[in-house]
């Protein structure tokens, strides 16, 4: 079995970026071996793969499109096609559990796109666009930053930022995979100014954890998977007590057992580790560690649950940390991958 890593990046001068395209690496015992850079795509900033590892999808951040690429047996990518999202600045995407529909969050214009996936993995024209409501009635929107699903695949959760005329909240949609439709069933508001960004589910599907960007907090919700309802239970700061600057929390991930949670802090250039009570889901901060780079927009736990990777967007590096199996704390592994303006990493085994 071969493992490959795909790194999304920023490419435009408006972002001050140095990226060239989607970078492909073969993951070996001796490290990451460069395989390919698929050039020609603008800001392929967030990526996802289908379950079969045959197709990779990328949003074009700051623009209005999403693209599909075929994945060969040797891990290399071949461009398939690009379609419009009918929105501006797509920032996150995910496939439904059938692989027939691609969901895309359009941050700037407040819409969630539902895009059909053809049998060959390429994308068809958009089928549906659902807007996240804001304050003030028609025309006012909130700003979705993620489209993620619970462990059953029945529910689509959309954390959204309020900004000026929106509402900071997480909206829950019921997914109809036969019709390619999503229907809002509930939402839960955040603290004023918290700005929900991303969330992740515990393996038991009962606990959902969110990261709030502007006040740099982690939030615990209990999830009612029968009715699609989130109930807030706890909120904690993820910045050290002696840091008095502005927060700008970003990514959130969990190691496979569900015992430890990780959150990145961009202005503080760090990752915070939280242990999780397996009975009630409560969080407890156990460590804050620097990422040895600037602006860790993205973090991820590797598929084996042994390492955490922090993508330092402004210093062109991916920093590797070993995860302590007993307490979840992080230690620099000594491995650093140099790659331009990284903002996303996904893995695939073939």
Image (tube, helix red, strand yellow):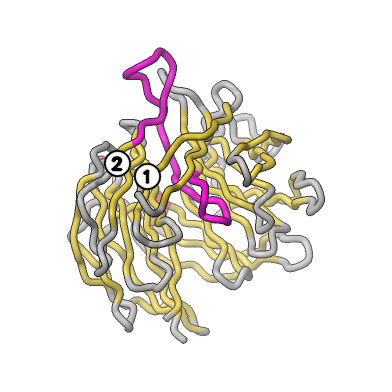
For label 1, the crowd category at 10 Å Cα-Cα, with few meaning under 14, some 14 to 19 and many 20 or more, is some
**Mark found first going from the N terminus, 2 or 1:** 2
Residue holding disc 1: 181
For label 2, the crowd category at 10 Å Cα-Cα, with few meaning under 14, some 14 to 19 and many 20 or more, is some
In this rendering, position of residue 307 left or right of residue 16: right
Tell me what residue is drawn at x 46 percent, y 53 percent. 312
- How far across and how far down the image is residue 154, in percent? 52, 51
- How far across and how far down the image is residue 115, in percent? 29, 50
* Secondary structure found at label 2: strand
Which portion, as a residue range, is magenta?
130-156
* Secondary structure found at label 1: strand
Q: Which quadrant would residue 215 be assigned to in this image?
A: top right
Task: Give the residue at the far bottom of this rendering.
Answer: 1
As drawn, 277 above or below 197: below
Q: Are marks 2 and 1 in contact (CB under 8 Å)?
A: yes
Q: Tell me if residue 259 can be seen.
A: yes
- How far across and how far down the image is residue 101, in percent? 35, 55
Tell me what residue is drawn at x 40 percent, y 73 percent. 52
As drawn, 159 above or below 124: above
In this rendering, position of residue 244 left or right of residue 132: right
Residue holding disc 2: 128
């Amino acid at each position: 079995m071969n493992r490959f890593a795909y790194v999304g990046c920023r490419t435009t001068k408006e972002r001050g970026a140095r990226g060239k395209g989607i970078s492909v690496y073969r993951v070996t015992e001796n490290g990451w071996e460069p395989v390919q850079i698929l050039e020609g795509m603008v800001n392929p900033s967030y990526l996802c793969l289908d379950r079969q590892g045959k197709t990779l999808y990328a949003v074009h951040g700051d623009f209005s499109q999403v693209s599909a690429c075929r994945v060969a047996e040797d891990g290399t990518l071949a461009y398939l096609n690009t379609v419009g999202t009918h929105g501006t600045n797509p920032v996150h995407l995910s496939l439904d559990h059938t692989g027939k529909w691609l969901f895309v969050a359009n941050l700037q214009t407040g819409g969630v796109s539902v895009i059909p996936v053809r049998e060959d993995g390429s994308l068809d024209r958009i089928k549906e666009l659902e807007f996240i409501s804001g304050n003030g009635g028609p025309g006012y929107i909130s700003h979705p930053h993620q489209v993620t699903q619970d462990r059953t695949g029945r529910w689509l959760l959309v954390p959204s930022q309020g900004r000026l005329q929106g509402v900071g909240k997480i909206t829950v949609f019921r997914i109809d995979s036969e019709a390619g439709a999503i229907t809002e069933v509930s939402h839960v508001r955040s603290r004023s100014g918290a700005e929900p960004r991303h969330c992740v589910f515990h393996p038991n599907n009962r606990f959902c954890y969110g990261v709030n960007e502007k006040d740099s907090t982690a939030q615990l919700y209990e999830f009612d998977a029968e009715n699609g309802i989130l109930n807030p239970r706890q909120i904690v700061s993820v910045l050290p007590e002696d840091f008095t600057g502005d927060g700008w929390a970003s990514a959130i991930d969990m190691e496979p057992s569900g015992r430890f949670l990780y959150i990145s802090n961009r202005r503080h250039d760090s990752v915070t580790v939280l242990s999780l009570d397996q009975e009630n889901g409560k969080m407890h901060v156990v460590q804050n560690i620097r990422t040895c780079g600037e602006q860790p927009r993205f973090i991820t736990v590797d598929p084996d649950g042994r390492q955490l990777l922090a993508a330092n967007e402004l210093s062109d590096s991916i920093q590797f940390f070993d995860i302590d199996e007993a307490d979840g704390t992080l230690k620099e592994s000594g491995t650093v991958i140099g790659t331009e303006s990284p903002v996303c990493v996904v893995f695939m085994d073939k």
